[in-house]
């Protein structure tokens, strides 16, 4: 029996290569200027080639964003195992902030740009919700899993997310340097914030 | 004695008109695409005219940003008078968040874009520091004005700023809608955050 020829590997490679090239175009020109034409040019393929895998620029952007959420979730999940949910929450906060510091472009793509039309990108939504659920899960360990505690879980999740998202923005921004805060204060900022969140959660409501 | 002719009013008007036109160019094309040429075109003056008042595009941008900080500080100062510093802090938080919600472009210009070279814009720095000092002042009412309490004031200022900056970013961003949180949770988010900050500040360290 003659050996079957495997299907050509190029299509899969091109699909992946587009994601990588798109990230480069975004880094160079800003996300507003991402186009499938530029991606094709960077890859040295015909202008039409990326359209085989991505019907529009927004579909490719959604895929780039989805990868960011996936890697962000992996980074958060790599924080280790903690018996104490409070320690788990603190570790999650530190891990969140280290991702934002080390991957400012990816962080911005997830949380600071206008999203492509969401109805067309269910995979992106699913991976974004999955990432938020990592925080919810830790809070359910603190507050319990009952239906009655779900609002509290979501309110605290919003509060804690705001807190770390805000510190990430403050520390990555240009304004903070102008305030001439002591280096000691800047060094302690993350641990102080984690302590304040802990104190708030532990206090009687 | 003949009446002295007053100096022509145009220069002052042009200086102001440039600030207003720059804000419009930023709203239309994004801050990356602000140029003195576009500002001149919008005002119907010669390409060279804006240079009489602003040596560069960055000088005009710095002036636009400075106005944002001034109006933001005025908005924060309009929160009213409170005998209880905790109430004052809560009112400051609500006022901060209402500004961010009502003026997303101005908010972004202050806190989310790369700043022009700071050495050349001391007025901008001064107005930014003045705005941050509004928060510090309220915290000094809570923690005292002694030299020993200054680090605590600055650490809490960073924590509280992060918290409201983060909630502003989360609520202005596109991601939040995808998480399908209950409307009740979203409605309560600001007051829950203010309560959590209060509880943290009130707890024994």
Image: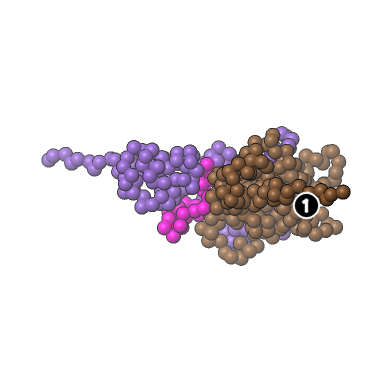
Chain colours: A purple, B brown
Which portion, as a residue range, is magenta?
Answer: A105-130
**Residue A122, picture quadrant:** bottom left
**Residue A91, picture quadrant:** top right
Q: Is residue A203 above or below residue B34?
A: below
Q: Nearer the viewer, residue A99 or B57?
A: B57
Q: Residue at x 42, y 42 (%)?
A: A22
Q: Is residue B25 above or below residue A99?
A: below
Q: Secondary structure at mark 1?
A: helix
Q: Magenta region, mostly helix, strand or loop?
A: helix
Asked whether A112 falls inside the magenta stretch, the response is yes
Using the rendered image of the protein, determine whether residue B24 is visible from the camera's viewpoint: yes
Q: Residue at x 65, y 62 (%)?
A: B188
Q: Position of residue B27 (x, y in %)?
A: 58, 53
Q: Is residue B201 left or right of residue B103?
A: right
Q: Position of residue A141 (x, y in %)?
A: 59, 53
Report which residue position mark 1 lands on: B202
Using the rendered image of the protein, determine whether residue B163 is visible from the camera's viewpoint: no
Q: Chain of mark 1?
A: B
Q: Nearer the viewer, residue B130 or B39?
A: B39
């Amino acid at each position: 029996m003659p050996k079957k020829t495997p299907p050509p590997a190029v299509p899969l490679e091109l699909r992946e290569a587009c994601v990588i090239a798109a990230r480069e175009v975004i880094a160079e020109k800003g996300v507003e200027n991402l186009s499938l034409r530029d991606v094709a040019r960077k890859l040295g393929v015909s202008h039409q080639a990326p359209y085989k895998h991505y019907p529009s620029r927004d579909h490719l952007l959604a895929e780039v964003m989805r990868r960011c959420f996936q890697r962000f979730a992996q980074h958060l999940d790599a924080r280790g195992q903690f018996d104490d949910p409070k320690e788990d929450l603190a570790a999650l906060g530190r891990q969140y902030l280290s991702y934002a510091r080390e991957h400012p472009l990816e962080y911005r793509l997830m949380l600071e740009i206008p999203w492509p039309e969401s109805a067309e990108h269910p995979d992106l939504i699913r991976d974004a919700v999955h990432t938020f659920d990592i925080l919810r899960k830790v809070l359910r360990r603190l507050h319990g899993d009952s239906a009655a505690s779900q609002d509290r879980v979501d309110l605290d999740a919003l509060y804690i997310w705001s807190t770390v998202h805000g510190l990430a923005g403050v520390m990555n921004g240009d304004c903070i340097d102008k305030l001439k805060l002591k280096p000691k204060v800047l060094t302690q900022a993350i641990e102080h914030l984690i302590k304040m969140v802990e104190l708030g959660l532990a206090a009687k409501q």
